[in-house]
Image (cartoon, rainbow, N blue to C red):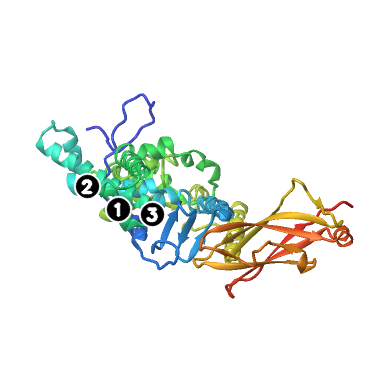
Amino acid sequence: MPQTGAAKPSSLLHKQIPIVTRSVKGKFRNFKTAVMVVAYSIYFLLPWMPWQRNSAADQAVMFDLESRRFFIFDLIVYPQDIFWLAMLLFIAAALLFFTTGLIGRAWCGYFCFQTLWSDLFILIERMIQGERPARLRLMKQPLGAEKILKIGGSHALMILVSLWTAITFAAYFSYAPDFVIALFTGHAVEAAYITVGVLTLTTYFAAGVIREHVCTLACPYARFQGVMYEADTLAVSYDSKRGEGLKGRTLPIIGLKTRDERQEKGHGDCIDCGFCVQVCPTGIDIRDGLQYQCISCGLCIDACNNIMDSVGYPRGLIRYDSEKNLSSDQPKPARLEWKRVKVIGYATALLIAAGILLYNIGTRNDTDVSVQQVRQPLFIMLSDGSYRNRYQVHIVNKTELDARYHLSVRGIPASSLDLGSLKEVRVRAGKSLIMNAKVDLERTIAQQTEKFEFVVTSSNPDTAPVVVPANFNSQR
């Protein structure tokens, strides 16, 4: 029978052997399941979490493109806060590099979206089609009612999950209850149907059809992981010294069942059962050494430990360990070696970026003000010899309540500011306003003034005044 669990290196034009995984029990499988449950709970339930708001829908997390505001609980993000996005991307990259330097591709094995949805779709296959031997028999049997019902039913359920995944994603950009009703009654906008359709197809195709090929062929992270690995990096590894012995691995036949018998005849602890290959979602044989297809999910560790328990051998033939420890004459228990220049550098960058982001969020003012000087002309000389500069003051109200703002100047006479008939302006919640201001200075004062300040004061006593420096130009 062909080994359907092993993916041998081959050309893209060659026929690929389908990977049919076996279920396994163990601490790594339990951890993956726990991560999947938590991740799905957050993703699918968060758009439906209510959160009282004054200027938008009562939804805890909503990316409102129409008003150009992102609501994340009590935090409101505006386009002016693009710096936060840059810092988040940097933090994500630094965290990825930091964890890879310590424990390899932990992100890929436990937290990647492709892994999470592939795990769920494999679970659907197992529930409907049965365990690995049953699925293999189903693949080989001729087309019939059973095959159509089981395979068709599992793929139909995958498509439904993909559809709800797409609807949930789109619900983050609108008020979820109204959006879902509009979507199924045909009253949603065209972009909503396009988004849902495209995401449904791509989710189903990536996690339900090509599956492991996303990791082995499409994902760039698998290609540059080798650059980030060091000799002290923990990775899923096979202890070849213990497993192979002097004469290699062999089945536990008569005379080679106990560990003492195997060691006496030069054979290692690996009984060549193939379970580590059968549980691997990318179909590799970890006994061939570190490979770029390995996503460090640890399922082969669970499979090997279960087999070791069944034959009475010590656990840990396959384990998280470093290349340095495995190659030593006396291997020690595996541990995280974080005292390395690269890892410390990643951690330092991560902490600094996170600190800057948190400080920036914590000290952000509820009012954003920018002043732009009108430069055509740069200044005007009035008939009395005084000079006039003109400015555009842009005020953004970042709160959820309407507010009134008073504009004044500092560093020059208060009477030099001319706002026409405006004494104060009203800016709606989450909106912005541009007001024109003129500053007239007498000739002697103008020639001595190069800089002054605009002061914007909110009617909300909890909002601190915003001071913006400005230049004054005259003929000197």
Q: Earlier in the sequence, mark 1 or mark 3?
A: 3
Q: Nearer the viewer, mark 1 or mark 2?
A: 1
Pointer 2 residue: 126
Is residue 256 rendered to the left or right of residue 397?
left
x, y (%) of residue 440?
79, 59
Type of the residue with mark 3: Ser
Is residue 326 rendered to the left or right of residue 127?
right
Type of the residue with mark 2: Arg
Pointer 3 residue: 174
Residue that lies at the very extreme toward the top in this rendered image: 13
Q: Is residue 397 above or below residue 143?
A: below
Is residue 272 rendered to the left or right of residue 464?
left
The structure residue drawn at horizontal position 40% and vertical position 63%, both measured from the top left corner, is 60
The structure residue drawn at horizontal position 74% and vertical position 60%, both measured from the top left corner, is 469
- Name the quadrant containing residue 280: top left
Type of the residue with mark 1: Val
Pointer 1 residue: 180
The reply to whether callout 1 and callout 2 are in contact (CB within 8 Å) is no
